[in-house]
Each structure stands twice: as C-alpha cells, then as structure tokens.
Image: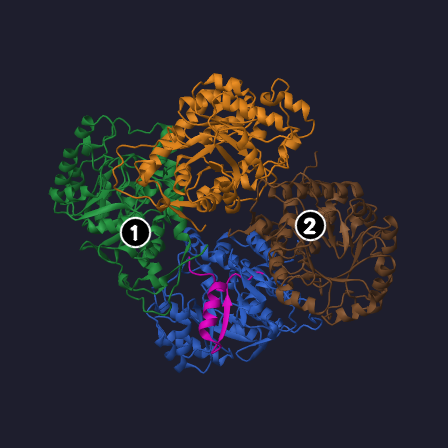
Chain colours: A brown, B blue, C green, D orange
C-alpha cells in the first residue's frame, strides 16, 4: 500500500489500531459536526493562484516565537501516544526533531516530560498544560517543563470539563492497565474526581506568568472577544482551536474562526491554528489567512500508528512536499510572500 | 445497548414499537420536510463559545410563568401515550415530577386529567386544549384542569384540520379498541364529525379568558404578525411550534421562527419553542435566541417506549447533563448568562 | 396499494407503462437539471402560515379568463395520451369536465379535436398550438378549435426545435403504428421534415389574432423581457413554463421565473405556471407568488396510466384536497386571501 | 451502445482504456476538487432564454485570432494521445481539420510536430509550449512550429512543477516503452531532472516574442491581476484554465474565473476557456460570459479512445449539434447575438 497522502495513513490506522484506541483518537463531541466541519471549511476556501513568478528556489522555513522551523507545521498536543505506538511520545519527539519542527507535548502523555526530553535532546518543544484542582501539581509540571528546556507553555482553555464523545462512553474508554498518565501519577491519586479545575479564569494567566519565564500560548480561542482578552492578559501566542471538535460541538470550524481572531489580534501576538489540516494546501490557506503556523493532531497519531517515529516523519514529509508544491503553484517562493490575496472565501 | 444520546432511544422505539404506533409518532405532513428541517435548522446555527470563565458551579434552573423548573426543558403535549407505554400519561406525569419539570398534558391523552393528577400530585403541569365544535365540552375541560391544579392553559392554534400524514393514511391509523381519548369520551359521541372547530379566531382567546384564571399560552405561532396578535390578545406565553412538522409542511423550522417571534414580542410575554430538540446544545441555542424554555415531543415518547417513567427520566437526564455541559463549554455558569452573543446564525 | 399522494401515481406509472412510454413522458432535456429543479425550487420556498383565522367554510374556486373552475389547477398540454391509456385524450377531457376544471388539449393529441369535444361536451377547454411551416395547417386547426367551442388558444413559444432528450434518442422513440397525431395527419404528409416553424416571431401573434377571436395565451415565457413583449403584443395570458424541462436544460425553474414574470406583467394579463407541481401546497405557493392558476403535465399522465379518466380524477381530487387543507392551515378561507405575505423565498 | 452525449464516450473510455491510461487522463490534483468543480460550476449557471426569435437559419461559426472555425470549440492541448489511440496526435489533427476547428498540439505529443502537420495539411493548429531549462530546446520547438505553419503559440503558465495526482503516484505512471515524447527526445536526454523551468516569469514573454512572429496565447490565467499582466506583456490571447484541475487543487472553476478575467481584459485581447465543458450548452454559457471560444481536453481523448479520428469527430459533432440547438432554444441565431443577458449567475 503506497502512502501517498494523509488519508492513506488514516485508513491504515483505522484498520490496524484496536477499535477502542481508534475510536478515542477519532472521537468528536456529540454529532461530530465540528470535527468534520474543520475539514469541510478548508474545502470551501478557494485559491487565487498567480502565474509566472520565479519559483525555482523555494524557501518554506518560518519562525515561531523566534525559533526557526523547517516549515510551518508543528505537532499539536494530543494524549496517550502509547495507544498508537509502543514508544509513545518518545517517538513523537524524535520525529519532530528529525523534521526540525515544534512538538507540543501534552500533559496527558504516556511518557514523562523527562523521558520525552531525553529521547530527543535539543528538539524544539512546548509543553501543554491543563490547570488542575491541585494547583501544586500544575506548578510542579510547569517548573519541570521549564527546567527540561521546553520553550513555551501552552495553556488549554477549552476543557473545563471533558466533552461528550459518544463512542468513548459506549466503549467505556480508559487507558489499558500498563499505560499511565505518567506526568500526573501522584496528582491523580490526590484528586479522586476529575482533576481539571473548571474555575480557571483569565486571572490565572497572571498566576502562570508568576511561575515561569516561558512564553505563554493560549489554546482554544474561537472569538474576537477572547482573542482581545488573551492579548490584554499578556499571552505571547494564540492557538485557534476547538480541540479537534472534541469539546463543544457545533462551534465554528477553526479556519473560519482564524479570520476573526487574526483581525482582532492585529499582529500583536502570533496566531496559530489546529484542526482539519489534511493537505499541504490547507497549510497554505491557513497562512494566507494570517496563521503563523499550523499544528496537526490526528494525522500525527496516524503516522505513529503506521510506523512510529518513521511513520510520523512520513506524514510530515508529505505535508512538507505538498506545502512546497502548493506555494509554488500559487506563485509564492517563500513564506513571506503568502498573504490574503491568495484566497477567496467562497460563498458555497 | 448503552443509551448515550437521544437517538439511541429513537432507534429503540423504532425497533420495538408496533409499526403503526411508530409511524404515528414519527409522522410529518406531506413530504416531512418541516419535520426534518426542525432538526437541520439547529445544526445550521454555530456557537461562539467563550473561554476561561469560572464554570465550577453550574446553575441550570429557570422559571416559567413563575414556577421553577430544574432545567429549561419541559414535556410538549403529544397524544396517546398508551401507544408507547401501558401506563400512558400517568408515567409521563411521574417522570416530569421526578425531574422537576413541566408537563403539558394533551387533550388527546389516553388517561383522564384526574388520573394524570393523581399519578403525580404536586407536579407542575399545564393543560393543552383544542377548542371543539362542542364548546361546552371545551369549557368543561378547562374547568376540570383548573380544579385539578394545572397551572397553565395551552391553546393549540395550528390544527383547524388535521395535517396530511401519509403513513397514517396508508396504515389507516386509529387507536386500538382498548385505548380511549378519555378526556373527551362523552364529547366525542356528541360530535360525529371531526370534533375540532375550524372557525376559532383570536376572539376566542377572550372567551377562554372568561372561563379561567389560568395563564393562557398559545401554541403554534410562527410569524411576527401572529406573535403581535397573541400579545395584544393578552396571552401570557407563546410556544413557537409547527406541531412537529405534522400540520402545514414547508413552513419554517421552529428555531428559525423563534428569532422572528422573540423580536416581535420584545419581552412582553414568555416565548417557548418545541420541535427538533435532540441534544442539550439545542436547548442552549434556543435559549440564546430568546426562548425561556423548550419542550420535547417525540423524544419523550421514545423515553416512554424504552422504559416508561424510568425511560423518560433517562431522556430528561441526558438532556440535562448535555445542557449543563454545553453551557459550561460555552462559558456560561447560569441560565442568566445565556444570550444572543453565544450564537451565530450560519450562512450554510 | 393506497393512492395517497401524487408520487404513488408516479410509481404506478413507472411500473406499469411500457418503458419507452414512461421514458418519453419522464424525459427532460440533456441532464434533466431543469426538470428536477422545477420540483426542488418549490421545496425551497417556505410558508409563513397564519393562525386563528376562521377557516370553517373554504372556497377554493377561481376564474381563468372569466371562466370559473373548481380549484386553480388545470391540465397542461401534453402529447400522446394514448400512450398512457387507450382512450387517450377523450378520457382526459372527461376527467377535466367531471372535476370542473380546464383542459388544454395539445396539437399532438392522439385523438382529434372533434373526438375530444364529443367526449365531454360543454367542458372548459383551451387548444394548444404549434405554428407549422405549413401555415394553412395551423390556420385550419385554429378555426376547427374555435368552431368546436375551445375557449382559448395557447401558443407554445419554446419549441422552435425539439429539445435533446437522451432517453428518447436511445430508445428511438416514435409512436406505435396504431397511434397517430390525428389532428395533423394530412399536414404531416406535406412536411417531411420537422413540421414546426423555427422562424416564428412575436409578429406571428398578430397573424394568429387575425385568425380568431379566441383569447391568446402564450406558453413558455421565462423572463421579464419576454413577459413585457407578450403583453405588448396583446396576449390575454402567459403560462410561465419550461416545457417540463424538456427543451433548454438549465434554464430557471418555473416557480422562480414566475416571480419575475408576475412583477413585469403588473396585473395587465393573467399569469399561469406549469412544471413541478406535485402537492396541493405547491399550488398554494404558486398562487401566493402571483399565479392565477397552475397546470399539471406529468401527474395528469400518471393518473391516466393508473385508471384512465377515473385515475386522472383521483389525481385532481388529491390535489384539490391538499390545496384546500394547505390553504386552511395557512389561514386562508378563500383564494382571494392568498398573497405574497404567505411565503418567504428561502435562501437555501 | 448509442453514443448520444459526451458521458457516453467517457463511460466507453473508462471501460476500454488500460487503467493506467484512464487514470492518467482522468487525474486531478490532490482531492480532485477543482477538476470536479469545473463541471459543477457550469451547472450553477442558469440561462435566461428568449422566445419567438427567428432561429430558422443558424450560424454558429466564429473566428479566433482571425481564423474562421466551424463553431467555437477547439481541442485543448493534452499529452500522450497514443495512450488513447495508436495513431495518437495524427488522428487528432485529422479530426480537427475535418470538423474545421482549431487543434492545439501539446509539447508532450507522442507524434512529432512534423508528423502532425503531415497528417492534416492546412488544418488550423496552434502549438502549446512549456519553457524548458534547456532554452535552446524550447527555441528550436518554436521555430519548428512556426515553420510547419502552426498559427499560434500557447504558453502554459501554470506548470512550474507538476501537480500531485495521487493515482499517477500510486500507479507509478510512465509512458509505455514504445511511446516517446518525440518532440523532445534529444532535450530530454540533456535534462535528467524535470525538464521544465520553474524560474519562468512574465519577462520570458518578451524572449518568446523575440523568437517568433506567431501570436502568443497564454494559458493558465485565473485572476484579474494576471489577466492585466498578460495584456500588458503583449499577448494576443488568454486561455482561462486550471489545467483540468491537475495542478493547484481548490483554485477557482474556470467558468467562474472567466468572468473576472473577461472583466479585467475589457476586450483588449481574445479570451478563451477550457475545463469542464461537457455539453453544447456549456459552450453557450462560456460565450455568454465573454469567451471567444472554448477548448475541450478530456472529451477529445474519450473520442480518440472510442474510434480514433472518427470518434473525436463524433464528439465534436455532438457538441456542435448541442451548441446549435442550445443557441436556438435560447433565442440566438448567430454567435454575435450571444451575450451576458442570456445567463444568470445563480446563487446556489
């Protein structure tokens, strides 16, 4: 089976992963409308490609928060990578470093931050944080991440409670006994109930700021109002995200929300987007609409499921090649030439 | 079979109810366009969820016409509950009381108002009325309802004649011999022809008003013009409804009509809506667009068909949990925080 | 098999007619887009139904060019009724008279005008005319129709050449040897090539006017420009029609074109519409948008195919009942109360 | 099997061509969205047909760059005709001449320009050019084409690199050993890597101009900006094209882009369009929107696959008949009567 595009990896993962793991990764909230809309919304955007520009030398590198990456696609934070591949997040870290891009490690990793760091020393990594009822646990995580050389702190804002993913309820999803949310082992014992703190507000950004000198990126913003609040509370970046359609169903597709957020932010902080990226041309659309970089969630897991670190590199390489080709065919030789003139928000 | 969402109950009812009963409950008029549009129109509305608000303490209670209910979902009037469950409307009344919400008992109940009252003393109930050619029969019903402690009178305005439901015609639908429209037994004998009076006009509101001190709620309004007339004729509430798509096919979806009615009413009376509610997030959308409460019809019948009173409680509990979760994920901790800023009427 | 709605007759006809006849009646030009759009366009229109109006006494009669009909649905001109039922147009004429409505007999009838007249003396009938290369033949037809008491002359304007109906080409469609285009037998011999004259222009209306005192109705108008020309050339009525989607594919649906034509005509002549009417509520929509009456083509043929004259009466009776019910449920007790306020041209 | 419309030829080709050849011809880039949109976009355009115009004498001829053709449909440049029929481009040239229309021979022909010329002396032909890294090879081709009597030079602007056509990657598409890109045999040896030059810019139009006195037509323009640049750089014609959806996926459908290009060009040069033409009425739409002529790609290959030169003539004859009929049914007797009043860009 030739692996030509990302859906080939999806098909592979669906076929070979245990159903309960596939269902967990694939799950969207409720009717999965937003999960699917994330993809469909990209398809509604039309390019306005330009011809006869010199695209003989292509430069697809970019920088996020000052760090150069080989192309504007990073790895979004997703949990439980051991469900996809035995080495779990260690493989993810190695693949990201090999491809010279950014990996956002999840609080809900099945490897510790230390294991992840040791697996790929020197790689560009951010750490994704949920604020727990047990604030000491969160504080300890932030300090560990900073000490281990993570270069950004990504606060997830859209999960005061977990969304209703019907298949997970039906399957009675839980981690197999031999896997653990290793970063939180002790904290999990302390909190018998759901460990996340639904009372978190914008003021907790100040608390986070007091804990660390790392840049803070807020993930889960979908409106201009919240984008404005994020900037005012001093974050360094915003990830426009609906958690892959796993939280509130029937909110906006992320690529649609991106337009509104970019407009509100007016360049004051970097804006990224995740959700629905399946082709290199989706990356080009996101950048044309103002994103500095996109992050991929499920496609990274499909890559892991295919061949671990090597499979994830395959996924990234395909996206990279497709992105480069799309840029060239649209008439852009470097990322700096990408702009809103390249797209037309279609009426369909 | 895990009962995770309302469609699970629908599938159960479709499988286990006698075809003629399922068809009767499921029927829409003509091509069933409006029946299906009621659901689709909800899906076209997009949330604009807000992040990082304190949603640790959730309050989902509300009041309708001064009575508190545990959450803004009541039971819409539907006929012939014994077709779904042997105890019929008595089970419905018990489930509504157990869940602390409002049950609108139909004129076309298969239990008497007295039986319904006795089954769940103290429950919040309204009585749904059709005005009959035999006005004395209607008058007697109103008086009985008031005497039995029903707290509102719901006048159905959209059934001067019965809509054309093709399956019912094909099936030759009629009640099985052991069931009766008990509230009307005597009146039915008097009127050999269809007992409903197609000459009813707005002036009959005054006649109703003369019969009872109960608040009058008018059900079946779909336009701003009729909303204005309803307010001027002194009703206390309006239920935006198209009778579940069973009357005039190809009228508006109720959630679409709600916007227009709420605008016309300008807060002078309470506005409710029924039709198409299948998820807790639909309730949130209806409230965001100005409804004080929604009412569910077919889902209540599916609950009854599943396990009677217990099944209906399951349905209500699922809606309650989903509604609470949707509110939290949209950033609202209490019903009073819900407003039009939460939604975006999508173009699709 | 209960015949509950018009699609039941369609299914019957599809099952029992010879394929070549079914294909001929069902055919649309090219991709059949316009044929299908005629139906879909009705579904896109939403009612704005009004409540609590006295609809106890319903009056669904109307007048076309001064003649009263029992309800605003007539029989559109279609060819070759013997393909559907042995008695052909004689049955059609009898059914139309029995239902007290108007039948537009086609030039391409398989019975003569004399046979049609004799079959149902006194019925309201118009005669549909194609202008032939052999003008004498056309002139003779007009005179015969007038002499036989036909009360209107319907000039078809949209068939300078026959549209490309792929199935007819594949089937090599032609009339079986025992059927004849009886009205034209002699003229057909004269013209070996297609007998219709593609050089006809607006000036030929004056020629027609010189031949007869019958009112002239022009059929096949789809634009405001042509509507204006029709009025200026002195016609008495316009049938908005695209020949059932059998001529130019991908023109407008007739109910969409009706709006534009009605606007242009400003009440100076009567406007009718055919194409896509499948339910009584479609009739109500057409009238709300300004049509004085609608005409049905294929549904009449399905009725004939089912049981001849009796089957066609069934079809008309169903439409009549559905139309009356739709009117009542929309709050109109008589045709004069129908107006544009009843509908909303939906965006979908 | 009767060959009634172009899809009949498509079905034939799909059935009888080797899969690898069918896939190559059918391929679109990535998800094939643009390939399919080219067709769908035509369907969204509605005619506004006019009635009662004299269409007894039809004149469907037109001129492109001064040369008369029998109707406004030419053969777009596509590669590797021997994959469809043993005689390859020689058959294409003969069919085009027989039908008195223009054939744009591709650089990637499997016959030499000399063979093509010899096969159909005197036919109207243009030569399609890719500019190669080896400029001498391109220059030589231009000179050969001019010397052989080709009457226009079509510069393809949208292929700095080849689009990603997944099926070709899966199939490992390459020409069978007995076929050759004959025009480039020597040049191919010189360039081991992809021979096309991605550094081509607008200035290379001046270089081309210096090589030849042939009119230069630029192919692949999709925006008003590039249309303006094309005019300013002195081309004689523009082909609005997205390479049949084989290059950048999710750009505009060509018939949609045509509107924008025609508007920008304001009659200064001739504008043509290719992509998605499947019916004579599509040609009429393109002309109504300002195209001087359309070109067909895949349908020509289907014709070749069916019966070589004869099959391609069948395809052209069907399009010709359909175009003439559409014109007549829309009320136009000659190409000069076609204009924007004939169409309505629909909202769907």
Q: Is residue B234 left or right of residue B274?
A: left
**Chain letter, disc 1 residue:** C
Closer to the camera, D143 or B220? D143
Percent across and percent down for residue D272 are 45, 37
Up/down of B343 relative to D297, above or below: below
Q: Which residues are magenta?
A: B250-278
Image quadrant containing the N terminus of chain A: top right
The image shows residue C204 at horizontal and vertical percentages of 18, 41
Task: Kindly state the secondary structure of the residue where label 1 is placed.
Answer: helix
**Membership of D9 in magenta stretch:** no
Which of the numbered marks, if any, corresponds to residue C224? 1
Instruction: Report crowding for label 2: few under 14, some 14 to 19, many 20 or more residues within 10 A (C-alpha).
Output: some
Q: Is residue A9 left or right of residue D106?
A: right
- Which residue lies at the image location 28% right of the left edge and 43% below the top edge? D51
* Residue C118 in the image: above or below residue B76: above
Residue D123: percent from left, percent from top: 43, 22
Give the labeled residue for mark 2.
A26
């Amino acid at each position: 089976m030739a692996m030509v595009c990302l859906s080939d990896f999806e098909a592979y993962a669906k076929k070979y992963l245990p159903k309960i793991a596939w269902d967990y990764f694939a799950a969207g909230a409720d009717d999965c409308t937003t999960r699917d809309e994330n993809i469909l919304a990209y398809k509604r955007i039309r390019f306005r490609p330009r011809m006869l520009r010199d695209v003989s030398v292509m430069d697809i590198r970019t920088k996020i928060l000052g760090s150069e990456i080989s192309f504007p696609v990073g790895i979004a934070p997703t949990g439980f990578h051991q469900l996809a591949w035995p080495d779990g997040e260690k493989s993810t870290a190695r693949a990201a470093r090999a491809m010279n891009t950014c990996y956002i490690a999840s609080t809900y990793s099945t490897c510790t931050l230390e294991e992840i760091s040791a697996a790929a020393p020197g790689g560009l990594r951010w750490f994704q944080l949920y604020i727990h009822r047990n604030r000491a646990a969160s504080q300890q995580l932030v300090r560990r991440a900073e000490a281990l050389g993570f270069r950004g702190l990504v606060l997830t804002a859209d999960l005061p409670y977990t969304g209703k993913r019907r298949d997970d309820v039906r399957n009675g999803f839980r981690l197999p006994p031999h896997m653990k949310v290793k970063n939180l082992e002790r904290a999990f014992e302390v909190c018998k109930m759901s460990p996340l703190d639904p009372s978190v507000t914008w003021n907790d950004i100040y608390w986070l700021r007091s804990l660390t000198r790392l840049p803070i990126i807020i993930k889960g913003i979908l409106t201009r109002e919240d984008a404005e609040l994020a900037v005012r509370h001093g974050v360094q970046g915003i990830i426009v995200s609906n958690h892959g359609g796993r939280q509130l169903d029937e909110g906006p597709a992320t690529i649609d929300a991106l337009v509104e957020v970019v407009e509100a932010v007016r360049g004051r902080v970097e804006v990224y987007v995740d959700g629905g990226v399946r082709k290199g041309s989706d990356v080009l659309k996101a950048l044309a609409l103002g994103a500095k970089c996109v992050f991929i969630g499920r496609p990274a897991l499909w890559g892991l499921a295919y061949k671990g670190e090597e499979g994830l590199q395959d996924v990234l390489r395909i996206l990279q090649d497709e992105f480069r080709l799309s840029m060239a065919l649209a008439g852009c030789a470097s990322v700096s030439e990408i702009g809103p003139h390249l797209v037309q928000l279609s009426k369909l």
